[in-house]
Amino acid sequence: MKNILISNDDGVFAPGIEALAATLASVAAVQVVAPDRNRSGASNALTLDRPVEAHHHTNGFVSLTGTPTDCVHMGVAGLFSDVPDIVISGINAGANMGDDVIYSGTVAAAMEGRGMRLPPIAVSLAGSHPQHYDTAAQIVADLLSHIDSLPLPRRALLNINVPDLPLSDIKGIHVTRLGHRAAAGKPVAAADPRGKVRYWVAGAGDAVDKAPGTDFYAIEQGFVSITPIHIDMTLNSAMDDVAQWLEAVL
């Protein structure tokens, strides 16, 4: 029996986390620790300027007045239940593909579980108003039953995106690389009632690298996308080039 810590960035009352917890509770011991409100785009932020408060809900979920990373940071320490074997983040309302993973609180929450016995999983349901959370939850449950045999290196995770379709309409699963988006548009200026100009951050750019083999392509074709992500951001292939450059300029 695995101990699973579930978190997200959509908040403790989001339908995706409820669906995921309900499905996985039938196969494992589940603890949910999630932000008390939507914290999409929080990336790997930790709350260091103030204390974080916890609220225990009647359904057993715990919410924190902090970020997704705060939630997992405390959860993996066993603060609210047993130390987990694996962290699963989601189910996010909307895809996390390509450059989205840089900003995603969903992916960041999974990253914070990198020290657990089993590789963490981030799962998102594609679409602007996704409905089929049960599809994504069942896919995670099926994969989880085989996760012990996955030869993934330490400090790596699986980023899973699921088409917003009934389970019977899913065409299969593709192992993919991250695609890429165009740059986002300019921030949108808006005046408040007192005339002060404020700015809305522009939405993500369109997918410009969505060739076969990318996460964007898999979702467009009705396939689940699984992208292995490594948290070590060292660009090893550039080490020699940088060393030679330094020798030439210094």
Image (spheres, rainbow, N blue to C red):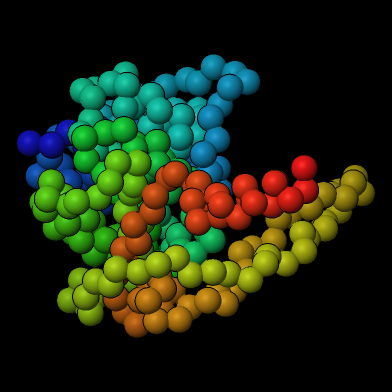
Quarter of the image with the N terminus is top left
In this rendering, the count of numbered labels is 0
**Residue 87, image x, y percentages:** 29, 39
Left or right of 48? Residue 67 is: left
Left or right of 54? Residue 82 is: left
| Residue 212 makes an appearance in the image | yes
Locate residue 85: give its quadrant. Answer: top left
**Residue 54, image x, y percentages:** 42, 22
Q: Is residue 18 above or below residue 45?
A: below
**Residue at horizontal 43%, vertical 69%?**
127
Left or right of 49? Residue 170 is: left
**Residue at horizontal 70%, vertical 46%?**
246
Q: Is residue 32 above or below residue 243?
A: above
Quarter of the image with the C terminus is top right
Locate residue 231: give its quadrant. Answer: top left
**Residue 36, image x, y percentages:** 46, 34
| Residue 123 makes an appearance in the image | no
**Residue at horizontal 53%, vertical 44%?**
43
**Residue 232, image x, y percentages:** 44, 44
**Residue at horizontal 64%, vertical 63%?**
203
In the foreground, 169 or 193: 169
